[in-house]
Amino acid sequence: MWDYTETVLDHFRHPRNVGRVEKPDGTGTVGSLACGDSLTLTFKLDAQGRIEEVKFQTFGCASAIASSSALTELVKGKTLAEAEKITNKEIAEYLGGLPEQKMHCSVMGREALEVAIHNYRTGETMVKELEEKIVCTCFGVSENEILRVVRENSLNTVDEVTNYCKAGGGCGGCRDAIQTLIDQVKTEREAVRQPTTAAAPRKLTHLQQIKLIEEIIDREIRPALQKDKGDIDLVDVDGNRVIIAFRGMCAGCQVSELTRRDFIQAKLRECVATEIVVVEEGKA
Ligand code: FES
């Protein structure tokens, strides 16, 4: 037996504003009969743009009926801008509280009002086509609401999501979609963790390092030496020591050898590894 307040029981036994407004300005339906809860809200505005008449039809439990009744009382006489600020928490407070497992009933009332206002402003008559995509129509839970509870509470399973916002606790038709959202948040978490490892420099194997040195020599170093009718051979790579031999005009010129060796070493340090030391064959 649910622990209902006197106000809930009063609105359940004597619901206010039941039915459908004739020629309504706005109509909103949320929920699903298949899941046991459905609510249609209709309203009419007066000349000043205030809600003059508002009615509801619901198929649901005592909390759904009481929440819908309370909502209609709360919005009467309000402008649409004022009415759309009403939260499901205010509906529950108006009723003196609702059992935790029944909080979704107050959420449904607020969403039916959002849909009805949307219908008034756009003329769209779809059952639930707001900017926020509804994932669980049984309890009117949007994609953003589910993402929010998953992120804020580090939820990992569909059952946990059901405990937090009711989504998935009815027909179960939305459970796959909820799992997809959980996976999406998991991927986001991974992406936040990974940049440091992804950006870490890749360690080259010895063979890869030799190939890269050859590439740099061919592309960046040899053409410069050849302009002075010189050339270079890669003799060996021993750890970080790169052993080279000058050829052509470069060979035998002591001063220019030192300059060229420094140039080659700087280039290889820049492109391959900062620890590289270039030595000339037979001189180290
Ligand atoms: S759509 Fe029925 S439980 Fe979510």
Image (cartoon, helix red, strand yellow):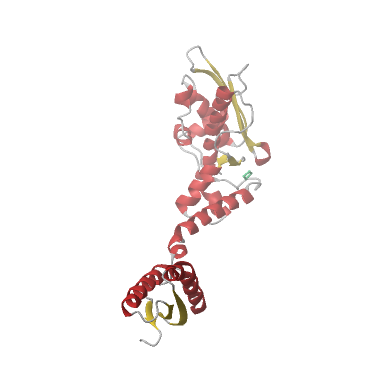
Question: Taking 33 as reference, is 238 left or right?
Answer: left
Quarter of the picture holding the N terminus: top right
Q: Quadrant of ligand 1?
A: top right
**Residue 86 visible in rendering:** yes
144 up-or-down from 262: above or below: above
Question: Taking 97 as reference, is 22 left or right?
Answer: right
Q: Which is nearer the eye, 44 or 228?
A: 228
- Which residue is most to the top? 47
241 up-or-down from 161: above or below: below
Res 30 quadrant in image:
top right
User: Percent from the top left, x then y, of residue 115?
Assistant: 57, 30
Which residue is rendered at x = 45% and y = 33% of the image? 90
Q: Which is nearer the eye, 255 or 20?
A: 255
Q: How many marks?
A: 0
User: Percent from the top left, x then y, of residue 242?
Assistant: 42, 80
User: Percent from the top left, x then y, of residue 143?
Assistant: 55, 43
Res 13 quadrant in image:
top right
Quarter of the picture holding the C terminus: bottom left
Q: Which is nearer the eye, 27 or 68?
A: 27
User: Percent from the top left, x then y, of residue 167?
Assistant: 57, 46
Which residue is rendered at x = 64% and y = 30% of the image? 126
**Residue 15 visible in rendering:** no
- Which residue is most to the left? 255
- Which residue is most to the right? 34
